[in-house]
Amino acid sequence: MNTLTRTFAQATLAAAALAIPFSLSAREVLYETSFESAEGFTANTYDADTAGSSVAVGDSWSLLAGIAEVVASGETPDSSAQIVRLRDGAQLDRDLSGEVATSDNEVFVEGYFRGAGSGVSLADASYPADQSASAIVHFSSADGIQLLDGNGAGSGTPVNTSVALGTANEDTWYKLTLFLDFTSQEWDAYVMEEGSATVTKLNTQAPLGFRDNVTSLNGFRNLAQTASEFDGFRVVKPILGDANGDSLKDGADVVRILEFALNDVTDPILSYNADYNGVGGVTEDDAMILASDLTTGN
């Protein structure tokens, strides 16, 4: 399976924040799907190889090659009813140019995946060079989750992570979150294993580089080199200050930032949003600056 994407002063501020009448509206979720029937996904088997061309799966998702199934499952990671099951060689694609603007220069891409992983490592995998790619995440049965540190010119260096796959973990869902910065052409990757509340940053050092010179999020493609399953895909635009993820900036976010300042933030998107002043890390200062901005309407 592979994919081409503290103290009395605080308590006082929290109480005051609840009384702030202003909120700043913003949009956060650019696109999301759980591959449900209500979203246009019919439980069925889709065969692009037999059709000789791409096959529509639902909600503008297309199967470009191989065989995929939309199936009912009682084990979905996002409490939905259906998942997508990809067979060896399947390529599932979604054009996102209608949902993501070129001005959305920072986005998070999330999805749930499970499977034993490919029998080849990232260094030996052949990813299409005819379409530009920013981030490449590779699932290897021998090497676990691997990332490509791209050079911006079509290639890069494989980076191993601490997350193992293989047959012992093929039934485990992993929530994968990518942060893509199209201005700096860099990206970060995070993973959370099913049943765990711990989020692991996969690239522990500096951000990774894009494989190609990509300046906006145009689409997403899941290439399966072995049987795998996929669910709960979404694209999110970060909103500084929206610490609770409701697409608004209001007093509730001030309270949440204060909570984050006392405890670790497990969600990478909310962690990014809560760092309101952008200096690194969530502190009381982020809450106080947001409260001031809400009061003045800035």
Image (cartoon, helix red, strand yellow):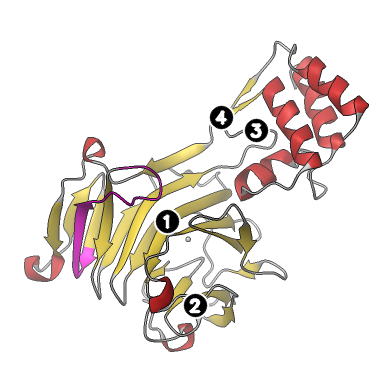
In the image, is 175 to the left or to the right of 25? left
In the image, is 183 to the left or to the right of 103? right
Q: Is residue 129 above or below residue 133?
A: below
Q: Quadrant of the N terminus?
A: bottom left
Local crowd at mark 3 within 10 Å, few (<14), some, or many (≥20)?
many
Q: Quadrant of residue 131?
A: bottom left
Q: Distance of mark 4 from mark 1, alpha carbons? A: 21 Å
- Which label is found at residue 242? 3
Q: Quadrant of the C terminus?
A: top right
Amino acid found under the numbered disc labelled 2:
Gly
Amino acid found under the numbered disc labelled 3:
Asp
- Residue, x 16% and y 49% (percent of image)? 43
Dots 4, 3 in contact, CB < 8 A? yes
Q: Which residue is mark 4?
A: 246
Between 122 and 187, the one nearer to me in the picture: 122
Nearer the camera: disc 3 or disc 1: 1
Local crowd at mark 1 within 10 Å, few (<14), some, or many (≥20)?
many
- Which label is found at residue 144? 2
Task: Please state the extent of the stretch shown in magenta in the rendering.
Answer: 64-80
Percent x, y of residue 81 = 27, 43
Disc 2 on helix, strand or loop? Answer: strand
- Residue, x 52% and y 81% (percent of image)? 155
Amino acid found under the numbered disc labelled 1:
Tyr
Q: Distance of mark 3 from mark 2, alpha carbons? A: 33 Å
Q: Earlier in the sequence, mark 4 or mark 2?
A: 2
Disc 4 on helix, strand or loop? Answer: loop
- Which label is found at residue 112? 1
- Residue, x 28% and y 61% (percent of image)? 92
Q: Earlier in the sequence, mark 3 or mark 2?
A: 2
Assess whether residue 74 is covered by the magenta stretch: yes
